[in-house]
Image (cartoon, rainbow, N blue to C red):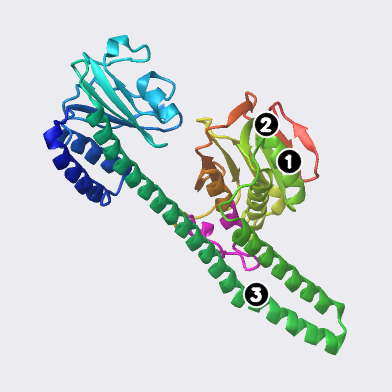
Amino acid sequence: MTAAADRPHALKALNTVATELKDCETPEEVCERTVDAAERILDFDLCVINLEEDGRLPIAAVSSGVPPDGATPMSVEEGIVGRAYRSGEAYVVDDIDEEPDANPQGPYGSALTIPIGDYGVFQAVSEETHGFDESDLELGELLVAHCSSALDRLEREAEIREHVHKLERQNDRLEEFADVVSHDLRNPLSVLEGYLELARETGDPEHFDRCEEAVERMHRLIDGLLTLARQGESLGETEELSLASVVEPCWRTADTDAADLVLEGDATLSGDPERLRQLFENLFRNAVEHGTGEEGAPNDLTIRVGVLPDGAGFYVEDDGVGIPPAERSDVLEPGYTTNEGGTGFGLGIVKGVADAHGWTLRIDESEGGGARFEFHGIESLRSDGAADENGTGREEKSGGGVETNGGAA
């Protein structure tokens, strides 16, 4: 479509487009400017760009002259566009009616199809047969090369931003580590030094017990810090797991003798077993440590685990004292605690595990007035059973046994 006399002008204009594309901030903007250049400079009236996404080629930009139904998304296995994307080769189709792969969305006679690297495909169509020549193909490939280079740049910049973001998160965790090492560990160290001195002076074994408590607290602080610093939002190998298969061993190892567990139904989800173990153990410990208040009787606490009503998540709740609305954001910050003996890292670890799996964590009040932790956005969750008519499930008592009350595990 570009006359031979206009070729030098077109080449010069395309070099200007290459510069303009460097200023684009999104792939969509790159595609829109590319289509605009194809119309203005190459005199291509009907153009469309499809960018690949999960095996599909949705539309990223289209000429203003293309009718609403003149261009549709398609699979990478479909049509001339799909063939060009798979092969990495450009095609000039002189007569669409004679092309077996063609699936025209309008009264089109010919087409020019050029792959944009691994990103997608540029296509121009004409209502006439033999609407494109070798010069159109060459100039079209030059324009698409500029488009591909701009998309390369945006991809590299996105990778750099993500890398910087990861480094910033790592630095934040290191700063948290340093803050606690320099501040929170000073208190148990001071306690340890004081009671060691008293033990030397009196020989009273009770002082050694207090020393041991201080050492145990330091171990808990360090374990929590290392979990946050080393793992952060990373995941190991994921597996198909049932809630019951994760919850029950965590319950037995999380020092939960002061409470009862009720499993209200069961479900299967995809997750990292070790990270999920961290999530449930920390939730159970948090409920036992904070759930009864100063006057509460420990053996009155019940913790429930079940599937959310929409089937896209699960919850862990207790009937303890709960978390005031004003503190629900703060409790997820590493180091925040209202318990004198707590480390403040348990719920921070829980949030890190949820973030690593791509889940959304919400804190609310349970029906019993305690804390309720909901994990949303679990598309792979599959229900394996439901509670019985009375709403009961499997119940694990503080004595360590499992009592089946009609629920499925």
Q: Which residue position is annotated with label 2? A: 393
Residue 316 x %, y %? 60, 43
Q: Nearer the viewer, mark 1 or mark 2?
A: 1
Task: Report the residue at 55% width, 62% height from top.
Answer: 334
Q: Residue 333 colored magenta?
A: yes
Q: Which label was assigned to residue 300?
A: none
Q: In the shown orientation, is residue 231 left or right of residue 191?
A: left
Q: Amino acid at mark 3?
A: Leu
Task: Report the residue at 18% width, 16% height from top.
Answer: 128
Describe the element under mark 3 as helix, strand or loop.
loop
Task: Report the residue at 56% width, 32% height from top.
Answer: 380
Residue farthest along the front direction in this orientation = 4
Describe the element under mark 2 as helix, strand or loop.
loop
Badge 1: few (under 14), some or many (20 or more) residues near its Cα, within 10 Å? Answer: some
Q: Which residues are magenta?
A: 327-350
Q: Are the two marked residues, 3 and 1, in contact with CB atoms closer than 8 angstroms?
A: no
Q: Which residue position is annotated with label 3? A: 185
Indicate whether 132 appears above or below 282. Answer: above
